[in-house]
Image: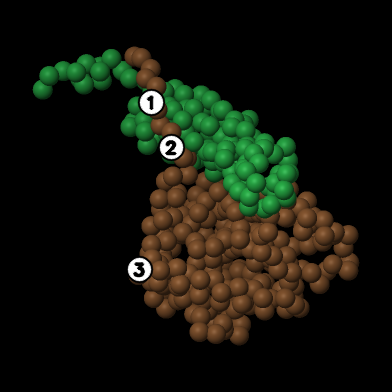
């Protein structure tokens, strides 16, 4: 259910960088620990993007696998379930190396020819 | 017409986190320690506050910011405790936001008597998912989980259980009547957030709640010490 909140945050970030230009695609990297359901995020993104420059934009999601490292023994592992104790030494002091991302990686915007001409026209 | 790819590489929660930092510096300036108190609906956040905010905490002036989708039922309950309570409703959002975010809390700042407070408890909207994502400018995050919710909750909502430094297990007076396996719950909690501080309480009978009062005092002392260090 937090996909609606996440979709809104993604939309706001994309709009900020689009500067009013129509957006055709938004690339997002999502860590596995974020527990985002891709289909649900797409569904909500499509709704919250309506009547904005992101209306109809595709959402390309790349999942980042979780990787943890034990601060005591240095063991690194990819947790198969939510287990944050070190499988080697059972220490609880664990660092998340990857898996908590919620990054807007890129956006693809549509530039009109007129705009470009305007941009390069000498003043 | 052609398409241009623009590299962004920005945390989608950056905008929220920036406002959260602004809130935090406003709280720091006024010397107010802030707790973000979260839970599922009905876990007993308000009951716990009713229990621990009366009698007043020694030398600690406490206020509550009450977050709800709509209505002021919880604020009305707390008003009888003679602590300043400010209501914050989220329903002007998209069908009523299911959490407080930094901007909502920011909008409530003018209504908060910060200069008269040492500690502000922000009672978040009852929800185990979204509140975990949104920092609001708090010093500490705590959650209430009741024994009627089932021992698998830490595994189902690791984001929430991992983000808190204190987990208060409430409604322990009901344990004799339930199949709830407390050891299993604590094992699951430890798997998700190893070594996290936890308390077993009953807001109904008051058992164990003194420890929560002590935690609030400790937290305030810790935050004051931190502030002294950072201004030294």
Q: Which residue position is annotated with label 3?
A: B231
Element under disc 2: strand
Q: Which one is earlier in the sequence, the residue at label 2 or at label 3? A: 2
Residue A42, quarter of picture: top right
Closer-to-camera residue (B66/B102): B102
Q: Tell me the residue at 66%/64% (across/down).
A: B197
Classify residue A23 by image quadrant: top left
Q: How many marks?
A: 3
Which chain corresponds to the colour brown?
B
Q: CA distance from mark 2 to mark 3?
A: 31 Å
Kindly identify which numbered label has been placed on residue B64.
Answer: none
> What residue is rendered at 63% in x and 63% in y?
B166
Quarter placement of the C terminus of chain B: bottom left
On the image, the x and y values in percent for residue A109 come to 38, 23
CA gap, disc 2 and disc 1: 12 Å
Q: Are marks 2 and 1 on the same chain?
A: yes
Q: Nearer the viewer, mark 2 or mark 3?
A: 3
Mark with earlier residue (3, 1):
1
Which residue is denoted by mark 1 in the rendering? B6
Where is residue B67 shown, x and y percent of the image?
Answer: 55, 62
In the image, B172 versus B220, the foreground residue is B220
> Hey, which quadrant is residue B56 in on the image?
bottom right
Query: Considering only vertical position in the picture, is B68 above or below B206?
Result: above
- Percent position of residue B74, x then y: 60, 69
Residue at mark 2: B10
Subunit of mark 3?
Answer: B
Badge 2 crowding class, 10 Å Cα cut-off, few under 14, some 14 to 19, many 20 or more, is some
In the structure shown, which secondary structural element does the residue marked by tag 3 occupy? helix
- The green-tinted chain is A
């Amino acid at each position: 259910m937090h996909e609606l909140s996440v979709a809104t945050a993604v939309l706001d970030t994309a709009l900020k960088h689009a500067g009013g230009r129509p957006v055709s695609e938004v690339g997002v990297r999502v860590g596995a620990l974020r527990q985002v359901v891709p289909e649900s995020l797409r569904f909500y993104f499509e709704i919250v993007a309506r009547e904005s420059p992101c209306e109809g934009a595709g959402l390309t999601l790349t999942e980042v696998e979780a990787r943890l490292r034990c601060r005591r023994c240095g063991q690194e592992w990819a947790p198969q379930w939510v287990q944050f104790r070190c499988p080697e030494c059972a220490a609880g002091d664990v660092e998340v190396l990857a898996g908590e991302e919620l990054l807007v990686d890129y956006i693809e915007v549509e530039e009109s020819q007129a705009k470009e001409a305007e941009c390069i026209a000498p003043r | 017409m052609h398409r241009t790819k623009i590299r962004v590489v920005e945390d989608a929660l950056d905008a929220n986190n920036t406002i959260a930092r602004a809130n935090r510096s406003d709280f720091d300036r006024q010397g107010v320690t802030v707790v973000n108190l979260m839970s599922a609906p009905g876990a007993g956040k308000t009951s716990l506050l009713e229990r621990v905010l009366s009698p007043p905490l020694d030398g600690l002036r406490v206020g509550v910011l009450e977050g709800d989708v709509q209505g002021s039922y919880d604020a009305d309950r707390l008003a009888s405790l003679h602590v300043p309570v400010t209501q914050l409703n989220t329903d002007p959002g998209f069908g009523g936001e299911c959490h407080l975010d930094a901007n909502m809390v920011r909008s409530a700042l003018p209504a908060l008597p910060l200069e008269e407070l040492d500690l502000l408890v922000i009672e978040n909207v009852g929800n185990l998912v979204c509140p975990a994502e949104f920092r609001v400018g708090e010093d500490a995050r705590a959650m209430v989980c009741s024994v009627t919710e089932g021992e698998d909750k830490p595994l189902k909502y690791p984001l929430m259980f991992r983000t808190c430094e204190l987990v208060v297990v409430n409604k322990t007076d009901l344990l004799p009547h339930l199949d709830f396996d407390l050891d299993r719950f604590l094992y699951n909690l430890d798997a998700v957030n190893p070594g996290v501080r936890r308390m077993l309480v009953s807001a109904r009978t008051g058992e164990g709640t003194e420890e929560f009062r002590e935690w609030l005092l400790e937290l305030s002392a810790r935050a004051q010490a931190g502030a002294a260090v950072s201004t030294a």
